[in-house]
Image (cartoon, rainbow, N blue to C red):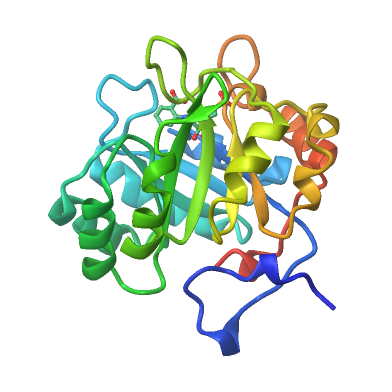
């Protein structure tokens, strides 16, 4: 029997899909070439940034729409809108124009924003709320229940630095801290934060967790010049034993 954790969020029960494998999301594509490289390397989800001021991979809405279509047309990649924004009308518009079905709220958007987005977006759009861990403590721990009630489908557990930097911190979390946090919610979760092809062994219990959904990587998928390389993506996919059929990721 398939484990219950692999249920795709917000899919009606009759269409719920199960898979024995976690997903690999790679973040920050900006070009058609990036999309091809990530598909070739075996990523399942690609993060497209919009509303990340000063971010090196930030994209105007039109470009998100174009690259989201390119991702889908690879036949295996699904696009994820990654944002610091909390403007519901703007996000609803980008989601509608791009057809994106994954929305990743990577900043400190409060539960009220999740609630408003849940009401504004089609039910098949999965809302991923990032929660940030600093020195083993989750900054949003007391809000987890509120985020769930507001309509969060998955949590993404990522590191934040002592000086408050979020995203691509290169900091790996301690498995015990992530497990503790995962057990505070009943939602599936993704893991991020300095993950490399060979770091699965540091998370042996976590990968067996019934609600472990997959990993989100940026730095390790790029070479020293910051360019995505298929062999690096493939190495992560193999090291973490990820990979889904596209219909299993929506
Ligand atoms: O990469 C960034 O700078 C970034 C900026 C804004 C939102 C998300 C961002 N990246 C996220 O960083 C983590 C992990 O990256 P890494 O593997 O530690 O480099 C991942 O969740 C990305 O989505």
Residue found farthest to the bottom: 14
Percent coordinates x, y for residue 239 in the rendering: 84, 36
Q: As displayed, is residue 121 above or below residue 45?
A: below
- Examine the image and state in which quarter residue 152 appears: bottom left
Q: Is residue 245 left or right of residue 30?
A: right
Identified at 82% across, 26% down, the residue is 198
Percent coordinates x, y for residue 194 in the rendering: 63, 23
Percent coordinates x, y for residue 163 in the rendering: 39, 9
Identified at 63% across, 51% down, the residue is 44
Identified at 22% across, 52% down, the residue is 113
- Examine the image and state in which quarter residue 56 appears: top left
Regarding residue 216, the answer to whether it shows in the image is no
Q: Is residue 196 left or right of residue 97?
A: right
Q: Is residue 22 left or right of residue 120?
A: right
Residue found farthest to the front: 142
Q: As displayed, is residue 151 above or below residue 23?
A: below
- Which image quarter is the C terminus in? bottom right
Regarding residue 49, the answer to whether it shows in the image is yes
Percent coordinates x, y for residue 222 in the rendering: 62, 22
Q: Is residue 90 left or right of residue 213?
A: left
- Which image quarter is the N terminus in? bottom right
Q: As displayed, is residue 212 above or below residue 7?
A: above
Identified at 77% across, 37% down, the residue is 234
């Amino acid at each position: 029997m398939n484990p219950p954790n692999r249920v795709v969020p917000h899919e009606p029960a009759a269409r719920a899909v199960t898979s024995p494998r976690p997903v690999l999301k790679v973040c920050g594509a900006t070009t058609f070439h990036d999309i091809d490289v990530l598909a070739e390397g075996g990523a399942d989800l690609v993060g497209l940034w919009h509303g990340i001021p000063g971010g090196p991979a930030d994209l105007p809405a039109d470009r998100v729409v174009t690259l989201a279509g390119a991702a889908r047309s690879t036949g295996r990649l699904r696009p994820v809108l990654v944002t610091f924004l909390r403007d519901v009308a703007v996000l609803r518009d980008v989601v509608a124009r791009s057809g994106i079905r994954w929305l990743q709220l990577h900043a400190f958007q409060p539960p009220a924003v999740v609630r408003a987005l849940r009401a504004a977006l089609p039910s098949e759009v999965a809302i991923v709320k990032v929660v940030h861990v600093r020195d083993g403590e989750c900054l949003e721990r007391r809000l987890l229940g509120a985020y769930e009630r507001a309509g969060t489908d998955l949590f993404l557990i990522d590191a934040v630095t002592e000086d408050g930097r979020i995203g691509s911190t290169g900091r790996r979390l301690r498995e015990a801290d992530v497990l503790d946090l995962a057990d505070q919610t009943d939602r599936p979760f993704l893991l991020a934060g300095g993950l490399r092809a060979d770091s699965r062994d540091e998370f042996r219990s976590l990968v067996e967790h019934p609600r472990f959904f997959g990993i989100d990587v940026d730095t390790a998928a790029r070479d020293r010049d910051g360019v995505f390389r298929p062999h690096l993506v493939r190495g992560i996919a193999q090291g973490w034993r990820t990979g889904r059929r596209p219909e299993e990721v929506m």
